[in-house]
Amino acid sequence: MSSDNESKNSRMTWEGCSVLLDINDGDRLVFARLSPAAKLKIGNKNCSLQPLIGCPFGTVFQLDSSSDGAPFLSPLQSKGNVNNTEEIKDGQFQAESKDGQLSSESKDNRSLIDNNTAQSLTGEDIEDMRRQGAKGNEIIEALIANSATFDKKTSFSQDKYRLKKQKKYAPKVLIRRPVARSICEAYFKKYPLKIGFLRVDTLSLLLSMANVSSNSDILVVDMVGGLLTGAVAERLGGTGFVCNSYLGQAPSMDIVRIFNLSDEICKRIVRTSISDLLSQKESPEQNPKHDVGIVESQSNDQMSASVCMEEASHSSENVISDLGAENAENNTFPALRVCKAIKAGEKASQEIIDSWKENGFSSLIIAAPDLDTWTLVKDLLPLLSNSAPFAIYHQYLQPLATCMHNLQLEKMAIGLQITEPWLREYQVLPSRTHPCMQMSAFGGYILSGTKICSN
């Protein structure tokens, strides 16, 4: 393998790779391509992303200011494990003191009045500290020392106060590897329409029910921005093929660019129209005619809101796709740049199509919420080999129920079942573990089954 491919397979970032930047524990999620010219805007400051090149994924950076006031990202040093446990019983905070004795004190926030007079440190004082080269943590400690009510707060309120000030004066940036899970979570949190409201647990079920494994030839109908295609290619790992089929104009596959897939894996992602696949088995006059208008309009909408990861040709900065920042005036997502063609997704050769005609595909995965499910399945299921599994995702139940009923009538598949994924997210903190107050209760539906010979 070349040194370029070796660097892409390492756990370190490299120049030109895509990363997911998690700012302040999910407050903002930014996709960026690292280069010396790339910059990230945090608050009202632009900082270079060059320090992130060559660092391991999972490294946490903190925004600091140099002596001349220029912002920069510096790696945050770990302070190690802090063994300071607290037991909370009936509002009594019992913490172990230095002499080993348990001291009990009762605290609550009932007597605290938020009248903006508790903090004696003014904005001018904070700016003076910054000009003198004070770090973000030093400013936070100064705010705590000059707060008249901090010591009267409960331990939970003190933690919230520290976290609030840390996000403002010492933002943290976590480098996350852009894999299927992290990409799906980021889009589902900030832009779910782009991926058809496909949740991460639903995506994993699709791959499992379709038996996506090495050396498989997977037929995919991906109308969710390329997320499904990238996830399948990532699991195959450079073996087999991923055939992205479509009706009319080819849909957007911009999300595939974020996966940092190697050249070998990209060669295994091919595209072809459904009419080309069906023409190998039927005459052109017998091919079913589909309403292409929906596909074309939906594709144009996706392209207009696509996430671009390429460097701008007329700019010194890299294009950064911010999924968390919203327009300050109309509270909407910013307009994103249209991407160019990518290496992955070349047109399938006639030789490969003939091989699929003879042997059939290993499995079928459909995620096309805007297309008629039964029409797609009726045309594509004969392209599978016998006993091949299939999995179909839809945001609503009725299209899948209709498709399941028709499959039973036509006796085209067995083992049919409709699954509704269920996921509950928990907050796990000392003495305050509970389900998250705001979480998604809906993950769509999956129709799965096994294709049988109709003869």
Image (cartoon, rainbow, N blue to C red):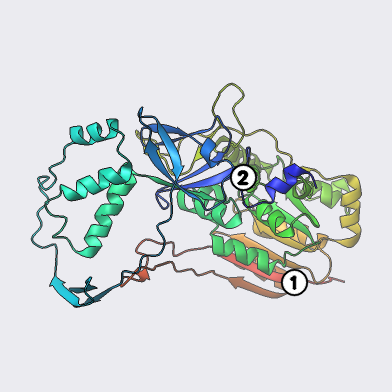
Please name which of the two marks, 2 or 1, marks the residue nearer to the observer.
2
Task: Identify which residue is drawn at 64% across, 52% down.
Answer: 371
Residue ranking furthest to the top: 314
Q: Amino acid at mark 2?
A: Ile
Q: Considering only vertical position in the picture, is 386 above or below 257?
A: below
Residue 383, how many percent across, how many down? 82, 59
Q: Amino acid at mark 1?
A: Thr
Q: Considering only vertical position in the picture, is 72 above or below 435?
A: above
Task: Identify which residue is drawn at 55% across, 33% down.
Answer: 319
Residue 398 in view (yes/no): no
Residue 65, how many percent across, how many down? 37, 35
150 or 98, which lies in front?
A: 98
18 or 217, which lies in front?
A: 18
Q: Residues at badges 2 and 1 in contact (C-beta under 8 Å)?
A: no
Q: Which residue is mark 1?
A: 450
Mark 2 Cα shell of 10 Å, populated few (<14), some (14-19), many (≥20): many
Which is nearer the N-term, disc 2 or disc 1?
2
Marker count (numbered): 2
Secondary structure beneath dot 2 equals: helix
Residue 372, how many percent across, how many down? 65, 55
152 or 440, which lies in front?
A: 152
Q: Considering only vertical position in the picture, is 139 above or below 219?
A: above
**Going by the image, does 305 lie left or right of 159?**
right
Q: Which residue is mark 2?
A: 258
Task: Identify which residue is drawn at 45% across, 33% down.
Answer: 47
71 or 163, which lies in front?
A: 71
Residue 154, how many percent across, how many down? 19, 64
**Going by the image, does 351 lie left or right of 403?**
right
Q: Quadrant of the C terminus?
A: bottom right
**Going by the image, does 95 lie left or right of 455?**
left
Mark 1 Cα shell of 10 Å, populated few (<14), some (14-19), many (≥20): many
Examine the image and state in which quarter residue 169 appears.
top left
